[in-house]
Amino acid sequence: MTEKNNKQEMPILMKTMIQALPASFDVLHVPLELDDAQAHLLYMKTVVDGGVLQQTVIKPFFEIADEHKFAAYMKGMPNRIDIPTTDELLTLFTLGFVLVYAENAYSLLEVRRLGNTEQGETIAETTIHGPQLAFSEDLETNISIVRQHYHQASLYIESQQLTDKSRTAISLIYDEKLVNIDVLRRVKERLNSLDSPLIQSSAELATRLTSRRFNLFPTSIITERPDRIAYNLTGGKIILLVDNSPFAVVLPVVFFDFMVSMEENYHTYFISLYNTLLGWFGLLICLTLPALYVAVTAYSPEILRTELTLSIAGSRIGVPYPSFIEAVIMLIFVELLTEASVRLPRSINAAATTVGGLILGTAATEAALASNILIMIIAIVAISTFVIPMNELGFVVRVCRLFLIIFTTLFGLIGLISGLLLIILHLTDLDSFGQPYLRIAWRSKRSEKKVSSE
Amino acid sequence: MSRFVYYLILTNMLAIIMSPIPRLLLLRAGDGALSGMIVGIIGGALFTYVTVSFFLKYPGQDLIELLTKYTSSWIQIPVTLYFAFMWFIAGTITLIMTVFLLITFLTPVMSIYIISLSILITIFFGVLLKTKSILFTLEILCVLMIPVTVLMFFKMFTSHELDFDQVRLAVMHIKSIPDFTAFNASTFTFMGSANLIIFNKYFKEKQNISKWSIICITLASIFMLINSYLVPIGFTGFDEIDQLMFPWTSSADSVRMKFGFIERVVFIFMFLFVTISFISIIIHWHVAYKLLSSIFRLKSLQIKQQNFTPLLISFIFCAVGLWLTVSFTQYQLYEYSKYYYNILPIFAGVLFLTMLAIRKGATS
Amino acid sequence: MKKGRKVILFFFLLVFSSFTILSGCSYKGVDKRSFVVGIGIDPGEGIEKKFKVTLKIAKPIPSLKSATENEYAYLVHESDSVAEAIRYLATEADKVFDFSQAKILALNPELLSGDLFHLMDYFVRRGDIQLLLYVIAAKPSAEEVLRVQPTLEAAGENSLYNFFDNTGTESPFVTTTFLFEFRRDYDTKGLSAVLPIVKGDGGGTKFIVNHALVLKHGHEAVELNLLETKLYNSLKKGESGYGYQINSAGYKFTLTIDRIKMKSKFELKNGQKPRVAIKIKAVGSVNESNKLLQLRELDHYNKISEDKLAEQVTILFKDLQEKNMDPFGFGLKYRATRLHTDKVLDDWKAIYPDLEFDVKVEVKLKSVGAIQ
């Protein structure tokens, strides 16, 4: 009798746990009982996959109907881990672990309810010929996607939990044979010294990883494309995957990585060369064209041909503002338009762009608030911003553009050269986890992938 | 040799266009410029060979390290100061010349302060960069600029208006006695290799200097000298060449691209060479800054973990540069830079003696 | 490190904010400039007024599509020097003059003899005036030529440019002389500068450009006629095209020359008269003829053309020699082919009047055109 009584009492660890856990509605303690056999389950309903729990724990209990055998079955579960310290145990509950007590032994089973395992379509970086599906929002699914894109035994995956409030699981993925040890060491150091209270997405993690606070240029790539991950793994880079985030972080990066569109790998040599050049040309255009307009209209109209100068002068007839104010106003207007079209639902999106772009543009010239040529330039600039393969760089370019306009307004054409040079100097001065950010790596694409140090 | 050594030498060669050298050469077009140049080329090639092969023997070490290691401080300090001075002046000459050129051709109404400042802001930051970053920037600019430059030179050489009879006429003056300034000015073309006294720190691998690399460098410098001496003569005539203040820019203004987006080639040249002079000033001043900061490190400027001596040095450089730019007249610029080029043999002598001292210290 | 960045950032902002105040004086919007497209200089009529300066200023066209013709403003002032006149004219205009787009410098031929230093100085000294200016001799006067409004000129173009920049008409009758070329050739000993003569005609509605003017320091200008201008352009500048009339041996045809090249070599032997051997090579075809032409007789036609051309060229050389002009640059050639001594130039001055021209022409007609 005494034995039986003992069994019906709650095990000590269970008791302490229940006391330690808040009395939320989803903290469940389920005692199982059948004939002599007895077991206790403790878990959080909302993070545990009920179906799996039913199939792998509860149902076998009633089928086996023997405490000893059930305990043995528990020990053989593939998702079982040993009991850690009490503090850690508490967090593990929130992650979807189930504490099972059977025959004086505790087992901790991972019966996590998986997040969104659905692979969405690529949105941020679309290609015509490449894979059309992006990462999902579940860490394990994502790891398996990476594995499937990169079948190498040397692929090394380290799992880790962030120390902030979110307790998000992250994985560090790299190819053991190719990775740069120095970079790896730095990344781990940075990961361990993170001190922000809450990190929610991979992009946020990426920004927190850089040591400088005032940063303009991103020192890591955020991507949603599995093929880019595989491409970068072959380059010896380190991938960070964050749970609940469909984006992966690629470290370290060189500037040229931002100018690589995955599309380039899916075309013939000359076509991809042409596309690359087009991308660079777009970068140059959207960076310098507005500043060049200011320089030409305000300081040095002599560099253009007479006909062009006269027609610029003609198109500016009646515009009351000096050209740099005109250019800045129109640029900000386009920025607003771009931002608006990001925020708006897709169905209204097109209408907003049409209204903004076409109607306001024409009206602005009709009302002599901006010259025709400037409207054209702004349109070209807006279009070529989208040619830049990585969005992150696109954002940076928008800021740099304004910086160049200011420089040009102050100093004329020489200001433009000076400003461009300053940007280049800043880029070469930057480093991404110890690797130079901008430098020309000869040996073409092969070494562009490589993080090799000289 | 590392490719960066070539870039250093090449930039220095290209930057002579933005220095008073073309005019100093052309002033003596009638007597001894050409023969002076020929002697200068031989001297310069020798200088390059000696300097480069010396530093290749000590991979990964710059002159500061070598001096502290192998010589005593009474050699080290004056030599370092002297070199810092020479490099600072070299950069300053390019700066003043660039500002004068811009004010004459591009923005005549702009204030000289603003033009100088627009250059100095970038230089201020450029000087403070890591040596390695400067090399990377240098490489990027070289890769971007040199193809366009070569294309433009080609355009110049094939221009209809280039009068080859004038060029031949200039060549016919070859027999005169070599001119001293012309000799020095053309040796300066080669002096890019002297930048190794600081930049050698980043060439860690053991390398060799081959016969071919010296030949290539010599050919390139011959090309550049021809370019800065004979091309202006071809465009603006031999007899009155000394009237032009900026002979090279004036001759670039004589070329046009009939169907180019920018019709007047001079602007493309100006963009190219202003950029090149930017990087040339940064390199020269960076060397001077490194040399100076090896001697001075003011304790009083130590605030927390940051020492502000580098900022101070760079600021002083820019301030002195600005002051000199504003106060110099064109005549002074040409006169003083002539003196500067004329003491280059002393500089080469000091450099060689220092090398000897280091060699001696290293072997004993 | 972080601290340092902040300091730099602060410094940067400080520098920037201080320059917003400094800047502004040189900021001249394109709509606040008036673009001078042509400069004309005539002799002044008043007393102590050496020059009459005409500026041709382009009015910006708001819309090229609706504009039918160009509109220009003309400003005229007489003064003792070019700079003074321009300075005076600047007070007449509400916008600042921008000379960087000026491409025509029209000079009245009356000004072109004697010393040109004072006249030309302003244009070479100013850095913002391009050296790629077309210098022309304008008849009857610079002002009138600048005021010509050709009927064929469309809005937004300047038809005078089209003559010279080799993108429009290309004719062996048009001499193109840039400012730098003019200055170089004028200053070089042993070479004479050549300017095209532009005549305004038809009541100010058309240009005629087919003559040229040879100038030399301290000499009277010599005008080249139609044929001479054409020969000069072909031989010196390699210009080619229509219009080489051959009228000899009963034939009368017109050649189109594709390529033409002249080489000269001095033959100086003691005791003999100095000679220069000139070889001219021309490749072309027949354009018009008064008879049927046989393909197999091309050699014969070559011969006829050669003789005729040689004759024309020799006459031109002799004529110029008599007037002590040297637009072909024989003097320069002479100086450029021997090592320099102090005597070379004086030697040449002695040689030139007695120089004999030994002209050999080699014409190679490729075809007789589309029919025989």
Image (tube, rainbow, N blue to C red):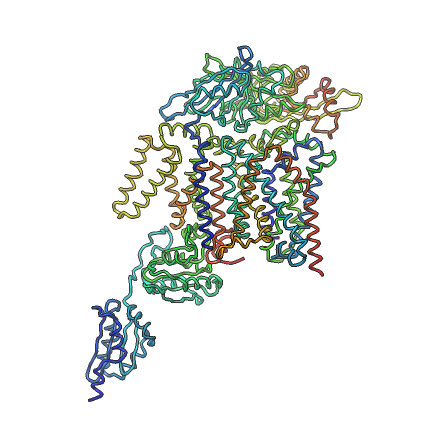
Can residue C95 be seen from the camera position used here? yes
Hey, which quadrant is residue A86 in on the image?
Answer: bottom left
User: Could you say which is closer to the camera, residue B293 or residue A88?
Assistant: B293
User: Could you say which is closer to the camera, residue A433 or residue C201?
Assistant: A433
Q: Which residue is pictured at 65% across the width and 33% down the height? A: B26
Can residue C230 be seen from the camera position used here? no
User: Could you say which is closer to the camera, residue A422 or residue A137?
Assistant: A422
Is residue B14 shown above or below B250?
below
**On the picture, is A334 further left or further right than B238?**
left
Q: Which residue is pictured at 56% across the width and 17% down the height? A: C211
**On the picture, is B122 further left or further right than A28?**
right
Hey, which quadrant is residue C125 in on the image?
Answer: top right
Q: Give the residue at the far front of this rendering.
A: B300
Whole-percent x, y for residue A307 in the image: 44, 28
Whole-percent x, y for residue C184 in the image: 62, 25
**On the picture, is B138 further left or further right than C156?**
right
Image quarter in which the N terminus of chain A is found: bottom left
Whole-percent x, y for residue B220 in the image: 63, 43
Q: Give the residue at the far bottom of this rendering.
A: A1
Whole-percent x, y for residue B354 in the image: 69, 52
Is residue C10 shown above or below C307?
below
User: Could you say which is closer to the camera, residue C319 or residue B131?
Assistant: B131
**On the picture, is C202 further left or further right than C220?**
left
Q: Give the residue at the far right of this rendering.
A: C271
